[in-house]
Image (cartoon, grey):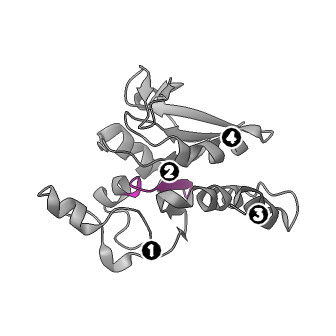
Amino acid sequence: MKYVLCFIYDTCVDFEISLTCHYINSEEGYKIIYVSYENSPVKSLEGMTIIPDRTLSEISSTSDIYGLIIPGGVERVLRPELESLIRNLINGKKLVAAICAGPEFLAKMGLLNDKKYTCSMEPHEYEEKGEKDPFPRENYVEARVVRDENIITAKGNAFVDFALEIWDWFDLYEYETERDETKILFSPS
């Protein structure tokens, strides 16, 4: 079984990850595992209650983990157990995918210092709160989704493109035109 973790936390944005997780879970041989800091229900920004499958501290090995998905959200707190997991996955050349404000976790760790990325966070949002902008803005790309080696980042409104890029990373398309057909299926007409 190939496990893909999805990090959930209070105020995470569930719609940014639902399409991605649904499709991965529907693939034979793949399973999404929802992980959180605590072993208690998480309330998404939209009000959905999600029960994590495991805590981050219960993840002792990344040998059978093939990736991590990080949604955006309001309360983005980087703790050592998440940082350790991300570093292990990055060093193992496994996927780390973050959408909307989720790339902030990677920026705070310095992982975007030599990577192209995109996100929904603007410098003024940090200035207004009296915080230092953690993003290396010289590497920012104005795009819906950006893939640089094993890191995928996306703007929040690009959740379909984000899903398609992750599915492509895992080579989940059965035939050559399936990606384009899927994009048309989920795009507004």
First to last magenta residue range: 92-103
> Around disc 2, counting alpha carbons within 10 Å, would you say few (fewer than 14), some (14 to 19), or many (20 or more)?
some
Residue 59 appearing in the image = no
**Position of residue 177 in the picture relative to residue 26 (left or right):** right
- Mark 1 and mark 2 residues within 8 Å of each other at the beta carbon: no
Q: Which residue is mark 4?
A: 22
Residue at (55, 61) in percent of width and height: 158
Mark with earlier residue (2, 4): 4
Residue identifier under label 1: 116
- The image quadrant that residue 80 belongs to is top left
In the rendered image, residue 95 lying in the magenta stretch gets the answer yes
Can you identify the residue that label 2 sits on? 89
The residue at which mark 3 appears reads as: 184
Check disc 3 and give the amino acid type. Answer: Ile
Nearest the viewer among 3 and 147 is 147
Residue at left offset 49%, top offset 62%:
153
Callout 3: 10 Å neighbours few (<14), some, many (20+)? few
The numbered mark, 3 or 4, whose residue comes first in the sequence reads 4
Give how far across and how far down residue 179 sits, in percent: 77, 63
The secondary element bearing badge 4 is classed as helix
Pair 3/4: label in front? 3
Tell me where residue 30 appears, x and y as whole percent. 72, 40
Residue at 30 percent across and 41 percent down: it is 75
On screen, residue 121 above or below 3: below
